[in-house]
Image (cartoon, rainbow, N blue to C red):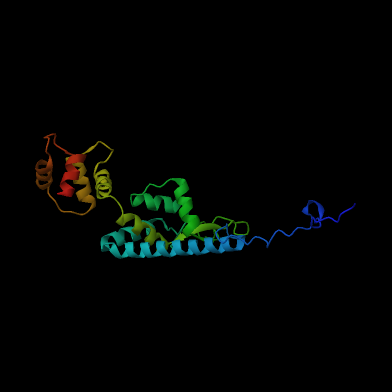
C-alpha cells in the first residue's frame, strides 16, 4: 500500500536561488581610492614644504652678519645681469664659492624644487627670444635660505679646511710664509715681514718652517 512521503519538499537544485546573506561591506582599512590617495599625497607634500620653509627661516636667523654678507657676495658675483636670479651654471659656481661643491643632479633637484620658470631673456642677450626655451632660475631670497640651512649644519672642521685651502696656494698641504704674506696683502692687513715670520714660528709645531693642515685646525679649534 502506498504511503505518503514524510520528507520535506526539496529546494531548487544546486542552490541556484539560495540566499547567501548580505553583500560584504568594504574594509575601512583597505587601500584608499585614487582621489583619497591624491589628496593624502598633496597634504603630505604641503606639510613637508612648510616644515622645510620653517627650517630654512630658522637657519637664516642663526647666521652671523658676516655669513649673510658672504652669501650676498657669492650671489651678486654670479648674477651678471643683476636681475635677482641665477641659472644652473651660476648656481653651481656660487654654491662652490661658499664651499658646497654639489653634483649636477643635486643642483638640478634644487632648481626643480625651488626654482621659478622664466624666459632666458635677460640672462643672455644673444639668445633669440622668439625661440628661447623657458628654464628654471633661483631667486636671491631662495638662494639665501638654502645656503643658510647648509651653513648652520656644516661641520666646523669643513669650514676650517676650506679656509686652509684658501691660504694653501697650489695644494701643497701647508701654509708657507709666502702664502701668509699673500693673504695678508689681499685682506689689506698691514702686517710686517717680522710679524708674519713670528706667526709662522709660533704655530709651527714640527719645525718645518710652515703651518700644516693639522696645525692649522688645532689653531682654529683652540
Position above or below: 58 against 219? below
Residue 155 in percent (x, y) is at: 28, 50
Query: Which residue: 77% across, 54% down?
Result: 15
Residue 8 in percent (x, y) is at: 79, 57
Outermost residue on the right side: it is 1
User: Residue 131 or 3: which is nearer the viewer?
Assistant: 3
Question: Taking the image as drawn, is residue 48 in sight?
Answer: yes
Position above or below: 64 against 218? below
Residue 156 in percent (x, y) is at: 25, 50
Query: Which residue: 36% across, 57% down?
Result: 147
Query: Which residue: 40% across, 63% down?
Result: 51
Query: Which residue: 30% across, 57% down?
Result: 152
User: Residue 14 or 222: which is nearer the viewer?
Assistant: 14
Question: Taking the image as drawn, is residue 81 in sight?
Answer: no
Residue 112 in percent (x, y) is at: 50, 56
User: Residue 10 or 1: which is nearer the viewer?
Assistant: 1
Q: In this view, does 99 lie to the left or right of 176?
A: right
Outermost residue on the front side: it is 1
Total labels: the figure holds 0
Q: Is residue 8 left or right of residue 43?
A: right
Amino acid at each position: 500500500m502506498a504511503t505518503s512521503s514524510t520528507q520535506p519538499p526539496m529546494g531548487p537544485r544546486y542552490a541556484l536561488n539560495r540566499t547567501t546573506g548580505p553583500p560584504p561591506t568594504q574594509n575601512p582599512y583597505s587601500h584608499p581610492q585614487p582621489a583619497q590617495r591624491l589628496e593624502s599625497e598633496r597634504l603630505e607634500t604641503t606639510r613637508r614644504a612648510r616644515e622645510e620653509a620653517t627650517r630654512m627661516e630658522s637657519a637664516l636667523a642663526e647666521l652671523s652678519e658676516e655669513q649673510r654678507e658672504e652669501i650676498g657676495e657669492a650671489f651678486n658675483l654670479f648674477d651678471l645681469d643683476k636681475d635677482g636670479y641665477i641659472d644652473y651654471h651660476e648656481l653651481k659656481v656660487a654654491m662652490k664659492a661658499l664651499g658646497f661643491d654639489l653634483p649636477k643632479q643635486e643642483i638640478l633637484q634644487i632648481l626643480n624644487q625651488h626654482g621659478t620658470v622664466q624666459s632666458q631673456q635677460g640672462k643672455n642677450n644673444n639668445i633669440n627670444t622668439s625661440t628661447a626655451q623657458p628654464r628654471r632660475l633661483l631667486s636671491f631670497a631662495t638662494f639665501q635660505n638654502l645656503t643658510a640651512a647648509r651653513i648652520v649644519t656644516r661641520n666646523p672642521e669643513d669650514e676650517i679646511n676650506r679656509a686652509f685651502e684658501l691660504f694653501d696656494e697650489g695644494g701643497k698641504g701647508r701654509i708657507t710664509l709666502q702664502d701668509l704674506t699673500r693673504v695678508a696683502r689681499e685682506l689689506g692687513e698691514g702686517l710686517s715681514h717680522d710679524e708674519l715670520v713670528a706667526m709662522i714660528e709660533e704655530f709651527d709645531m714640527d719645525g718645518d718652517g710652515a703651518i700644516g693642515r693639522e696645525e692649522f685646525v688645532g689653531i682654529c679649534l683652540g
